[in-house]
Amino acid sequence: MGEPCFVNPNLYANVEQVLKYSQDLSLPPHSWCVVGSDGVPYVLANRLRDAMEALKTIPLLPAPGHIEINVVRALFKLLWPFGMEHLAKILGFRTPKTLDYAKKAADFHKA
């Protein structure tokens, strides 16, 4: 079970705060902590880890949603010539631009 750190994780300063908070939780010499996140916080945490030597000891794990999205995109790309294009046309994606959108399995739910 995780230890919550109540901050908005979509800013570098806040992600850094979460990583340092997690690092403080694992201070004894034989303790460790894994941080799991998804989307924007995961990208920001990876960039911060690469830039800051003190944070490189924290293992980051992509959350299941991140892995699932990448699998779906890979399947769309793999199966496109074998029926996904036909399915997209049935679902109403008819113009080249909308078919390309469907092929990329793009999303527009970002805030």
Image (cartoon, rainbow, N blue to C red):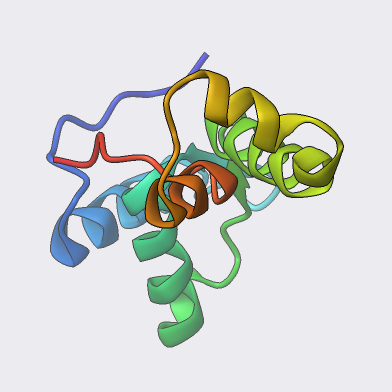
Residue occupying image coordinates x 67% and y 37%: 85
Task: Tell me: 11 left or right of 83.
Answer: left
Vertical arrangement, residue 54 with respect to residue 16, above or below: below
Residue occupying image coordinates x 44% and y 49%: 101
Task: Indicate the quadrant where residue 17 lies.
Answer: bottom left
Task: Indicate the quadrant where residue 19 lies.
Answer: bottom left
State the residue in front, 57 or 24.
57
Residue farthest along the top direction in this orientation: 1
Give x and y (percent) for residue 47.
42, 74
Q: Quadrant of the C terminus?
A: top left
Residue 79 seen from this side: yes
Residue occupying image coordinates x 48% and y 66%: 46
State the residue in front, 101 or 68.
101
Task: Tell me: 66 left or right of 77.
Answer: left
Residue 33 seen from this side: no
In this rendering, the count of numbered labels is: 0
Give x and y (percent) for residue 94.
44, 39
State the residue in front, 40 or 34.
40
Task: Tell me: 24 left or right of 46.
Answer: left
State the residue in front, 42 or 110.
110
Task: Tell me: 83 left or right of 7.
Answer: right
Residue occupying image coordinates x 41% and y 82%: 52
Task: Indicate the quadrant where residue 107 lies.
Answer: top left
Give x and y (percent) for residue 33.
58, 41
Vertical arrangement, residue 83 with respect to residue 9, above or below: above
Give x and y (percent) for residue 27.
50, 50
